[in-house]
Image (tube, rainbow, N blue to C red):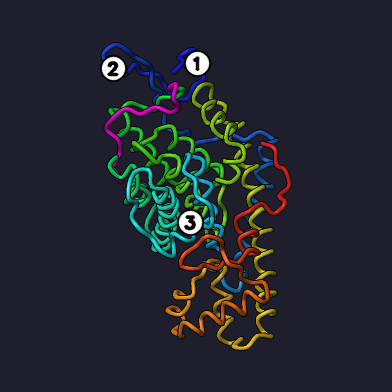
Amino acid sequence: MDKSLFSHKSPGFLVPIKIDEKNSDWSFVPNPLPDKFNLDEETWHLLLKAKEELARLDGVGRHLPNQELLLRPLQQREALTSSSLEGTYASPEQLLLYGIDPREPSSDKDPVNSWREVFNYGRALMQGRQQIDEGYPLSLALVRQLHQSLLDGVRGSDRTPGEFRKTQVHIGSTRRFIPPPPIEVSRCLDEFEKHLAIESNIDPLVRCFLLHYQFETIHPFNDGNGRVGRLLLSLMIYKWCGLHSPWLYLSAYFERYKDEYINYLFNISTKADWGTWIKFCLRATEAQSIDSIRRIDSLVALRQDFHERTNALNGAARLHPIVENLFAQPLVMISQLARTYNVTYPTASSDILNLVNVGILKELPDTYPKTFFSPEIMRIAYRGIDEPEYLP
């Protein structure tokens, strides 16, 4: 790590470490977060815009006819984009197929590893939300649980899932950034947990972004720190900003501006450039709130359109629940449908054919058993929908 990049303003200190018998380097230990944080005029303006859009998103979500069905696609998209930031890739179709039929990877090279990692992310997110809804506090215990769920049964599961690291780690192949040595991790985490628990005068949204920096800088696990940090960020925003459901996910914006995301975090450590980081996150909040509102509005309109198409079909009463559940799981198999709705295989096959004929379903190529999907739901939920450009 280049020691010369760290100025006297740096919110932490450097300590020497041994890389091996012949080589040494420096690692960065962050100071505890400040109890107060002043915002300049531009940041206040961005904060007001971000909170306005976030409140609008929460209002739109709160009045949905079925919140959970339309929340699920947003969470799955977050799982995909947060994982891709760490180099773990899966398509929406692969993620959904794995959700229908989970299986163990046969080797380290089996692509099922990636699918399961992404699937685990979504599951950890739902578990974290359940803990918060049941009244459990944001804490290191929750962080460890998120990490354990994330690494369950995947590559890296041998890297002490759910346990804080006892070895040195570094970020980047050239050791561009080296987090605190193991001896400092426990103390840094204790300070981190205090800031999770205390009452603060700092705006809750800004506080979330400060703590996200602190978590990523401590880098408390051997693996999975980025994903756990973004999971925790979504949960902090949900809890501290008083949302009725966790509607806001920022990984898509962070992925879109990955270099800026990494550099702005780094620049806090080297020269205490908090302002650029906070502004970046506030722009992300505004952009992703608008994006989520657009997707939700489109899904709501599509839901109504699907039900109208279904009304004219034979067996419409049986088809409406199938259509409704497509928004949570837009892939279906005939045998799965027969089991779920307790109908015969020929009846389930006929139902799917009816939905294909009105354009709600389409056969997914190269799948066995034969699988059908809703292209319109997939486009709205997982693809770009002509989002406006938001520069960081």
Q: Which residue is mark 3?
A: 95
Write the residue at 56% across / 82% down.
350
The first of marks 1 and 3 along the sequence is 1
Locate the N terminus by quadrant. Answer: top left
| Numbered badge on residue 8 | 1
| Numbered badge on residue 252 | none
Viewer-proximal residue among 284 and 354:
354
- What amino acid does circle 1 point to? His
Q: Which residues are magenta?
A: 161-175
- Eyeballing the image, is 16 above or below 312? above
For the residue carrying disc 3, how many other residues have a C-alpha within 10 Å: few (<14), some (14-19), or many (20+)? many
For the residue carrying disc 2, how many other residues have a C-alpha within 10 Å: few (<14), some (14-19), or many (20+)? few
Q: Main secondary structure of the magenta part?
A: loop
Q: CA distance from mark 2 to mark 1?
A: 28 Å
Write the residue at 50% across / 62% down.
367
Tag 2 secondary structure: loop
The first of marks 2 and 1 along the sequence is 1
